[in-house]
Image: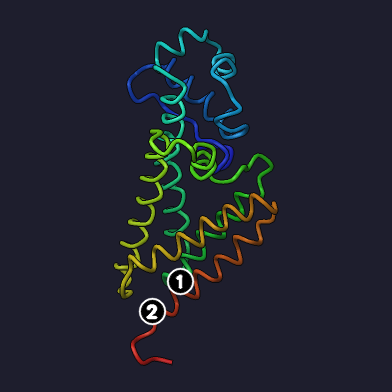
Amino acid sequence: MYTHWSVYFPLMPRDGSLTRARIIDAASRLFYAGGVREVGVDAVAAKAGITKRTLYAHFRSKDDLVAAYLEGRDQPNLERLAAWYAAAAGGPSDKVRAIFAGLAQAARHPKWQGCGFLRTTAELASMPGHPAIRIGRAHKKRFEAWLGERLADAGIADPPALARQVVLLLDGAFATMLLHRDPAYAEAAGEAAATLVRQAEKPCGGS
């Protein structure tokens, strides 16, 4: 499906426009590797093999293109996280740990550049109304809600609160690994997350 889950996701045309899909594909590669502020529309157009005029025929502005870049990462990222959870043997604590183990493995790829949603949000922090910020926020909330549902299915008490704690550990792992370039931070965060879930699995009054 892709070189690596957090590196880039090939995008299939949703509206029948191969040109639009090629533009988003090029933007995904360039924005993820170089950042949304550093990469200009000229570079995206060149990468897509089109003119800048053609690019603007599909996207009114660079802001719209940045939003489309993140929108295209939304479902593939969520599906990959869900797949890691589903494939892991054991109870919910083991499955939660597996998400962090998958992230650590992804971070070992030489083109890994962290979480595209968090990086883009950081670059656009002075523009809270930017559509990409809204998309990034919605993506993170979707994962948190999905994880809460899985924890609820496992019979764990107060799954929304626990899901939020796990998300904090996950996003902390993203940031710390990007800083230190050490996947062991994701593995350590996974152990902490598994401990939280395991404690929540214990019956009241249990030891």
Where residue 27 sits in the image (x, y, percent)? 52, 25
In this picture, is 3 found above or below 41?
below
Q: To which residue does mark 2 refer?
A: 201
Viewer-proximal residue among 133 and 187: 133
Residue 62 at x, y percent in the picture:
47, 22
Residue 97: percent from the left, percent from the top?
51, 65
The CA span between labels 2 and 1 is 8 Å
Q: Amino acid at mark 1?
A: Ser
Q: Is residue 43 above or below residue 8?
A: above
Question: Disc 2 or 1, which lies upstream in sequence?
Answer: 1
- Is residue 15 found left or right of 22 in the rendered image? left
Side (left or right) of 144 relative to 170? left
In the depicted structure, whether residue 70 falls above or below residue 89:
above
Q: Residue at x 47, y 24 (%)?
A: 24
Residue at 29% in and 67% down: 153
Q: Residue at x 54, y 71 (%)?
A: 192
* Amino acid residing under circle 2: Glu
Q: Which residue is mark 1?
A: 93
Q: Residue at x 42, y 72 (%)?
A: 91
Nearer-the-camera pick, 206 or 91:
206
Question: Considering the numbered disc 2 on the image, is that residue within a helix, a strand or a loop?
Answer: helix
Task: Using the image, determine if residue 99 lies above or below residue 201.
Answer: above
Q: Based on the displayed image, in which of its 4 quarters is residue 40 positioned?
A: top right
**Residue 33 seen in the figure:** yes
Determine whether, in the image, residue 154 is placed left or right of residue 191: left
Neighbor class of circle 1 (other Cα within 10 Å; few <14, some 14-19, many 20+) is many
Q: From the viewer's side, name the closer residue of 64 and 163.
A: 64
Q: Residue furthest front?
A: 126
- Give the crowd class for mark 2: few <14, some 14-19, many >=20 residues within 10 Å: some
| Disc 2 to disc 1: CB gap under 8 Å | yes
